[in-house]
Amino acid sequence: MNQKKLLLQDGCQIISSSSNRGKSGSLTIDTKEQIVLSGFDKNEGQGCLISSGFRGDNNISGEISITTPQLFLKDGAQIESVNTGFGNSGHIKINNAALIVLEGTCRKNGEGSSIVSRIDSIEPHNGVAGNIHIHSENLMLNDGAWVSSKTLGGGQGGDIIIATTEELSLSGKDQNGQSSIISASAIGDSKVSGDAGSIHIS
């Protein structure tokens, strides 16, 4: 997808997904000016979404690659790569931006806007959550916004790599009282637990 601008409003979504043994396709978005995700779905209250997902056995979600000078995620909007089976979730790459802003909360659940890579299956032999690469002059996480790599069960968490040349700012809380956060986590129990990924900020 190569456009001057990309505007998603009122809960609109761009999704690449698979529910069988095939790989979900990659999403590549390249704009010359900006990408804006804002507003809620009128019925559900859900924010806008760009997603690559796989729901099945032994395969991987496609990669999400975004190149734009300005990226705005508002009103609980999400960019996510998720796998609920035994495979890997795809990487998320946001390249060469001048400004990235995550702000505002979702009407449905009160959560902030987010960029997320996760493995959602609790099985003991899961895959690896994709890495999140963000390269921007300025990155602002406001109103409880979050950048997260997370795995359940025995999966391995992906790394978060953030490179900013001017400013990285985290401020504010969402409607549930959660502060803005950059997080790499592994959630399991005494029998099944993977390893969290690393966070690299420069």
Image: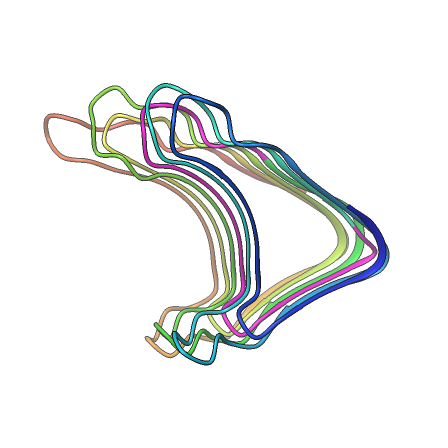
Residue located at (36% from left, 19% from top): 58
Q: Closest to the observer: 23 or 194? A: 23
Residue located at (42% from left, 75% from top): 174
As for residue 75 lying within the magenta part, the answer is yes
The image shows residue 186 at horizontal and vertical percentages of: 31, 37
In the image, the segment drawn in magenta is 68-91
Q: Outermost residue, left direction?
A: 190
Residue located at (13% from left, 35% from top): 189
Q: Which quarter of the rendered picture does the C terminus lie within?
A: top right
Left or right position of 40 against 45 = right
The image shows residue 32 at horizontal and vertical percentages of: 89, 55
Residue located at (42% from left, 76% from top): 45
The image shows residue 152 at horizontal and vertical percentages of: 27, 37
The image shows residue 88 at horizontal and vertical percentages of: 43, 26
Left or right position of 107 against 135 = left
Tell me if residue 43 comes above or below residue 178 in the rendering.
below
Tell me if residue 16 comes above or below residue 7 in the rendering.
above
